[in-house]
Image (cartoon, rainbow, N blue to C red):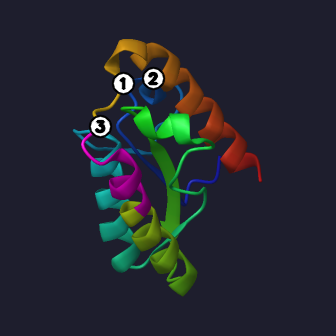
Amino acid sequence: MDKDITIVSNNPRLADFYDNVLWVDGDYIDVLYKVRDMVHLGHTIINHPLGASIRMFYSPYRSIAIRKGDSDRSVNIIEDSVISYLTIMGEREPDYKNARDYEFMDMELLKEGLTQ
């Protein structure tokens, strides 16, 4: 993987596979907030911040790849993603009961995003 890429994640499974992980202690929304901060500091999003389906919004885990480089498009994507996540989740809580499955799915989505 490109050494200029940083993965912002709260998925503990990634530690065994990637060295360039910026760990976020929190849930999916906390990862979105961290990526939003990084984008406003001059990073570009590589894979989309939202999951592949509505069901993935319930995941407690999310991994988003970024790299240095300004992008107005990334600003719009991350801002819209935060709003969408908060709107869809409302008062719902992440699904910790199926956490191991979500770890796996998040990692597979990240791998696919990095191959694009």
- Given the image, on which type of amino acid does mark 1 rest? Asp
Residue under pointer 2? 13
The one nearer the camera, 113 or 99, is 99
C-beta proximity under 8 Å, tags 1 and 3: no
Quarter where residue 98 is shown: top left
Which residue is located at x 51 percent, y 61 percent? 66
Which residue is located at x 64 percent, y 31 percent? 108
Residue under pointer 3? 92
Q: Position of residue 105 (x, y in %)?
A: 58, 27
Using residue 42 as the reference point, say whether residue 47 is left or right of it.
Answer: right
Q: Which residues are magenta?
A: 84-91
Residue under pointer 1? 95
The kind of secondary structure element at disc 2 is helix
Note whether 40 is above or below 5 in the view shown. Answer: below
The kind of secondary structure element at disc 1 is loop
Q: CA distance from mark 1 to mark 3?
A: 9 Å
Q: Position of residue 59 (x, y in %)?
A: 43, 32
Using residue 24 as the reference point, say whether residue 58 is left or right of it.
Answer: right
Q: Position of residue 7 (x, y in %)?
A: 47, 48
Using residue 11 as the reference point, say whether residue 76 is left or right of it.
Answer: right
Note whether 84 is above or below 96 in the view shown. Answer: below
